[in-house]
Amino acid sequence: MSVAPGRRGAIAFFVTFGVSLVALAVALNVGWIVMTWRDVATLLLGVFVFAAIIAGLILNTTFLVREIRRNEQHDAFVNSVTHELKSPVTSIRLHLETLLAREGSIPEDKRRDFYRVMLEDTERLLSTVEQVLRTGQAGRTPLTLERHNLNDLAAECVEFTRSRRHLSDQAVRLSPRSVAVEILGDREELRGAIVNLLDNAVKFSGDHVDVEVDVQRQGNRALLQVRDRGPGLPLLEVKRIFRRFYRIPGPLTQRIKGTGLGLFIVQSAARRHGGRAYAESGGPGGGATFSIELPVAPSEAA
């Protein structure tokens, strides 16, 4: 996400203004110390007051800068969602208008292609709406906890992603090393989190999609990992990417459309199930691994 020139100027102004006020406060503090060094009580009182003023100025400037950046993220989110909603709607309308205008003259195979494209656009539209709804409901709706085999759930998500993205069995696959691990969780929420990780890996893999899903048990924790061979992540971004609306700045992210909500939904789902989500990468060009760690379900006897 790039910062608009107007916002960049506002940030620079507030930072400069805040630094100037802090420098002025420090200068006044030094002057106060010089003038009152003989009166210890007055000296300590002045130092305390000036320190409080400086702290307040720093906090105020930090808050203002954060608000400007948050507003910039919200604007980017609105623009992305608008595009994600408008594009499939426009495509569906265009195909419907063509079918109506040329009714009876379109060959059956072409008509089927139109139906297929409209169905894909509808799925894309529903996916965007579901992401926004999941984000709005994050942490609010109660979980329906049931026993699930995480390996089977991962295999179902892999098959769903291959079908929706029209990918081969090798492009997105479940690792042969994966093992069966039972967890307690809400099926739909966990399924949504895994599908988001797979969609993210596929989108950023470019033309050569090579995504592998692995499920392992480590003590009393179940670990699901999604590995890709994409462009990788800058080391400073591996924690920021799970923030709401956050997208890594740069030309690649600008070319690949998204809402900045997918990984936030993954993190929220993992935390609600008593686990965590995190990312690892060897840096730019080294691919990335996204992981969901969840508690293993207690035994049936327990």
Image (cartoon, grey):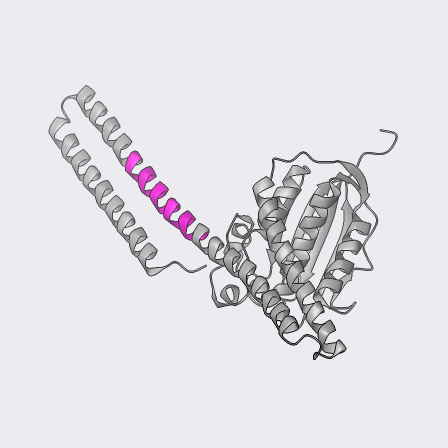
In the displayed structure, 43 sits above or below 159; it is: above
Residue 129: image location, x then y, percent:
60, 51
Please tell me in which quadrant of the rendered image residue 189 appears. top right
Residue 94: image location, x then y, percent:
59, 70
Please tell me in which quadrant of the rendered image residue 137 appears. top right
Q: Is residue 45 left or right of residue 297?
A: left
In the displayed structure, 170 sits above or below 274; it is: below
The residue sitting at 57% across, 42% down in the picture is 136
Residue 189 or residue 277, whichever sits in front = 189
Task: Look at the image and tell me in which quarter the C terminus lies.
Answer: top right
The residue sitting at 74% across, 57% down in the picture is 213
Please tell me in which quadrant of the rendered image residue 169 appears. bottom right
The residue sitting at 22% across, 42% down in the picture is 21
Residue 65 visible, this orientation: yes
The residue sitting at 65% across, 43% down in the picture is 269
Residue 239 or residue 84, whichever sits in front = 84
Q: Main secondary structure of the magenta part?
A: helix
Residue 294: image location, x then y, percent:
71, 42
Tally the numbered discs.
0
Residue 232 visible, this orientation: no
Q: Is residue 71 magenta?
A: yes
State which region is magenta: 56-73
Residue 42 or residue 283, whichever sits in front = 283
Residue 16: image location, x then y, percent:
25, 50
Q: Is residue 70 magenta?
A: yes
Residue, far top? 41
Residue 173 or residue 163, whichever sits in front = 163
In the displayed structure, 103 sits above or below 300; it is: below
